[in-house]
Amino acid sequence: MSVNAIKDSLSSIEFLPVQNYENVSVLGFETSNLNDFDFLTLKKGLRMGLVELNEENLNGIVDTIKVMNNAVTPLLILEGEVLIGAKQDRIANTSLLIPPHVGKLIPVSCVEANRWEYQTNNFYDSTNYASSNVRGARTETVNVSLKKDGVYKSNQGLVWDVINQTQKNLNIESQTSALKDVYSSKEETLNDYYESFPYTNKQNGSIILINNEVKGLELLYNNYLYKEFHERIIKSYIIDALQESKTSNTEDLDVYNLAEDFRDNISSSKYETFKSVGCGEDSRFENTDSTGSALIYKNELIHAVFFNKLKSLVI
């Protein structure tokens, strides 16, 4: 069962030393049930010319794009990856495995509200993830859509609201309200923060806290793949941490206790499983305080992400 794969991974977590800087704490971890699936990442597939990302048709549709995987291995697209170009920037609404030699229409959300014209013919991969607040809001509303209508549709207006609030909080002006402009404007500060959160040997996941509050848990199926995404993942939380003043000193013991409580809470909660748009299954988690999703393939956990809900979010 897909739920067992999630709970087995969470129960096998072994925490690494806490990393702290300013109002951010990162508690890396490793799990025992790693695997060596041979998946093509989006970055590598695009660089090798094996993957094509296009608008669904010439006119474009905001919540759908077309992916063609010309490789001999499945293509892994993670829910946080920002797809730049075409008529407007997007992020996938869930993590996906696209079979070899297959084209798929995939559900996406726009992260650039004020552009609807071709910038490039195709999409290309950004060096950044969507911010954790954007991803959390997107995940929570996709969960609602799946339960209600059985489709991977986000509340697009809410996603734009979170991006607009981020830009306002950080005093960033963007002509097209593009999320990527937040990252480019804060690049130096992001790099300064990130120096305190290097990847640790054997790490395949992290729990991230801001001001002693757990913001999210990120987990990938092996440490090699996680290492490739570590910097993007951590910076997706730093960009939200920059919107909050430091409120208290961080004690390592508090971080461990808070992380364990969060892990135990999501592990003991109920999940609903849906057919993925690509290969495998998509398990969804929701309770009063948290939301999340996990991609399962051949009864193995490929990618899982869990967020504490934004207190100001109104679905």
Image: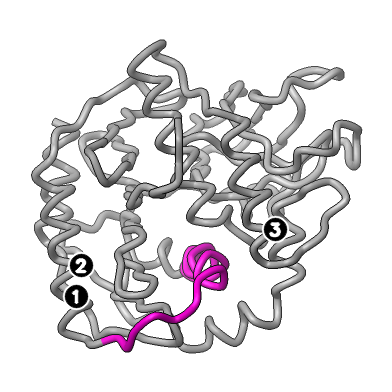
Mark 1 falls on what kind of element?
A: strand
The spot of residue 303 in percent (x, y) is 35, 48
Q: Which mark is residue 15?
A: 1
Q: Residue at x 36, y 47 (%)?
A: 309
Mark 3 falls on what kind of element?
A: helix
Q: Which-is-in-front pick, marks 2 and 1?
A: 2
Question: How far apart are the alpha carbons under marks 2 and 3?
Answer: 29 Å
Amino acid on which the number 3 mark rests in the picture = Gln
Q: Are marks 2 and 3 in contact (CB under 8 Å)?
A: no
User: Could you tell which of marks 3 and 1 lies nearer the N-terminus?
Assistant: 1
Q: Are marks 2 and 1 in contact (CB under 8 Å)?
A: yes
Q: Residue at x 79, y 21 (%)?
A: 60
The residue where tag 3 is placed is: 167
User: Could you tell which of marks 2 and 1 lies nearer the N-terminus?
Assistant: 1
- What segment is highlighted magenta in the picture? 228-250
Q: Which-is-in-front pick, marks 2 and 3?
A: 3
Name the residue nearer the viewer: 170 or 216: 170
The spot of residue 6 in percent (x, y) is 19, 45
Mark 2 falls on what kind of element?
A: helix
